[in-house]
């Protein structure tokens, strides 16, 4: 080893003991801050909680895993407070960070592995995406743990055939699929790795065992889709805009969408880590990457490339590529450790600042504002106050049946008004349902009425049957500046139009 390489590695050494202290310290900070978190459940969080109250093998927009996880923590705690709904997030990240240490040690079973494995754990636990998703329960948090377990078992199977590890591979990939369908983007890269790298091949017996195990795990969700008009598949197609090509957007908009997605990845995993992944891509193109480096590349970057292509063609959210950053974190750490002097330290400092700040923002969510006067966390506050206002209106009007069409309003109504003497329904527009609430909790045509209808647009009914009880604007939060309307209407006013 050259003197330069020695100085670089010595400057970046991190003991396992220190790494574990950082990982558990960050997790403890997140858990403690969740106790004093002042944000409301976000739309998706409230929806996931409600799914957990209605256990099934599938739901309108996602597979069932996140609902099962939330229900589990609610059950063992006897509480459905926001703390117990969200507590799984930092705990899953803790498990993923520890699993990444084990996976790195398994892949680099030499001195290199012992040196970079601690870094893989601390870099992951402080990724900006991990810091944000540790205060908001999400499917990404759960999925990346199962992906990491799958990679760990896959690496083991490349060394020796094993029935148990083949089962772990299949089950973990199946559970990742039961969390979010985006895990399918991993498969092309795995296929390329197995075709091009001798060290990435596993026996056909193990492939068969893993495939059977995975198929058994995902079968209930596939059956649910077959019996529910392929609801989740149709929703996925809708948000990806596969059938519309982005609603006919111009070429410039497609380019901006793609560049926006790629640029957002610098925020998802931090500028240093994503720069390292782009660097790894360039090294592969130039033919300068090593065998294990290429394996990690094929287990990560094809996901980013495929979803970037999706963004160029139609639409993609920044977090859709999260399953790339299990192997991607190891790849970035390995490259930074070997080829730069300060990369890992810089990345850790940036991540540590974000890991500290985001939980603080949730505690002071009603106080910290942007220069324009908006709350920094405005998307995550002001929802429960709307639901409580609706409850007051319904109580005063002596109406127990509440109807809404907006998914965000419905999500919080079901959560905030749980246990109160109200029946909540979604307006039925006819045709394929627009959300879970319309799919499962549509306003019955046989309900005698009248009902209290809440919407963010005025409504008219035949013969003037819509009686405006109140209109108001929320004082803060994501709906600040919008006008909400509360009407007393007969159910016939809200019936689907033929």
Image (cartoon, rainbow, N blue to C red):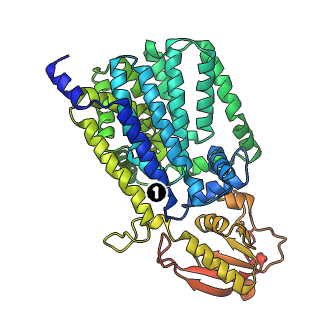
Q: Is residue 127 above or below residue 18?
A: below
Query: Is residue 61 rendered to the left or right of residue 54?
Result: left
Q: Quadrant of the C terminus?
A: bottom right
Residue 159 point in image, percent of width and height: 49, 13
Number of numbered tags placed on the structure image:
1
The quarter of the displayed image where residue 208 is located: top right
- Give the image location of residue 322, x and y in percent: 46, 41
Answer few, some or many: residues within 10 Å of disc 1's Cα (few below 14, many 20 plus, some between 14 and 19): many
Nearer the observer, 460 or 192: 192
Task: Mark yes or no: residue 242 visible.
Answer: no
Residue drawn at 74 percent across, 87 percent down = 463
* Dot 1: element: helix
Where does label 1 land, which residue?
A: 33
Q: Residue at x 22, y 36 (%)?
A: 342
Picture coordinates of residue 170, whole percent (x, y): 62, 26
18, 332: nearer the viewer: 18
Q: Nearer the viewer, residue 224 or 292?
A: 292
Q: Position of residue 255 (x, y in %)?
A: 36, 48
């Amino acid at each position: 080893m050259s003197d330069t390489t020695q100085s670089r590695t010595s400057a970046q050494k991190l003991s396992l003991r220190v790494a574990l202290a950082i990982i558990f310290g960050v997790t403890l900070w997140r858990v403690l801050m969740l106790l004093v978190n002042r944000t409301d459940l976000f739309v998706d969080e409230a929806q996931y909680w409600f799914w957990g109250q209605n256990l099934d093998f599938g739901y309108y927009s996602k597979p069932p895993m996140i609902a099962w996880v939330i229900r589990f923590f609610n059950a063992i705690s006897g509480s459905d407070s926001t703390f117990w709904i969200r507590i799984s997030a930092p705990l899953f990240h803790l498990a993923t960070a520890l699993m990444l240490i084990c996976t790195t040690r398994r892949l680099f079973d030499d001195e290199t592995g012992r040196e970079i494995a601690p870094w893989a754990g601390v870099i992951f636990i402080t990724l900006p995406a991990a810091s944000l998703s540790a205060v908001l329960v999400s499917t990404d948090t759960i999925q990346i743990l199962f992906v990491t377990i799958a990679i760990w078992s896959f690496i083991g199977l490349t060394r020796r055939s094993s029935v148990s590890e083949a089962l772990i591979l299949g089950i973990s990939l199946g559970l990742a699929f039961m969390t979010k369908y985006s895990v399918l983007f991993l498969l092309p890269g795995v296929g390329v790795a197995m075709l091009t790298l001798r060290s990435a091949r596993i026996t056909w017996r193990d492939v068969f065992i893993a495939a059977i195990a995975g198929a058994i795990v995902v079968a209930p969700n596939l059956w649910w889709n077959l019996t529910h008009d392929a609801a989740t598949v149709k929703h996925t197609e809708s948000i990806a805009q596969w059938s519309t090509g982005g609603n006919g957007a111009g070429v410039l908009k497609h380019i901006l969408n793609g560049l926006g997605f790629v640029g957002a990845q610098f925020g998802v995993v931090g500028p240093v880590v994503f720069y390292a992944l782009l660097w790894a891509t360039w090294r592969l193109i130039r033919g300068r990457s090593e065998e294990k480096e290429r394996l990690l590349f094929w287990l990560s970057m094809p996901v980013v490339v495929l979803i970037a292509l999706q963004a160029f063609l139609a639409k993609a959210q920044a977090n859709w590529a999260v399953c790339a950053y299990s192997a991607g974190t190891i790849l970035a750490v390995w490259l930074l450790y070997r080829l730069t002097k300060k990369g890992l330290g810089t990345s850790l400092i940036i991540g540590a600042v974000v890991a500290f700040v985001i939980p603080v923002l949730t505690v002071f969510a009603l106080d910290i504002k942007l220069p324009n006067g908006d709350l920094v966390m405005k998307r995550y506050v002001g929802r429960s106050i709307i639901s409580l206002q609706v409850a007051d209106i319904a109580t005063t009007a002596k109406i127990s049946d509440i109807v809404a069409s907006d998914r965000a309003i419905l999500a919080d109504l079901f959560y905030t008004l749980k246990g109160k003497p109200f029946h909540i329904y979604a307006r039925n527009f006819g045709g394929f349902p627009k959300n879970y609430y319309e799919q499962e909790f549509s306003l019955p045509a046989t309900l005698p009425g009248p009902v209290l209808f809440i919407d963010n647009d005025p409504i008219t009914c035949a013969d003037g049957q819509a009686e405006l009880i109140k209109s108001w604007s929320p004082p803060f939060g994501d709906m600040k500046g919008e006008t909400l309307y509360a009407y007393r209407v007969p159910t016939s006013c809200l019936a689907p139009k033929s």
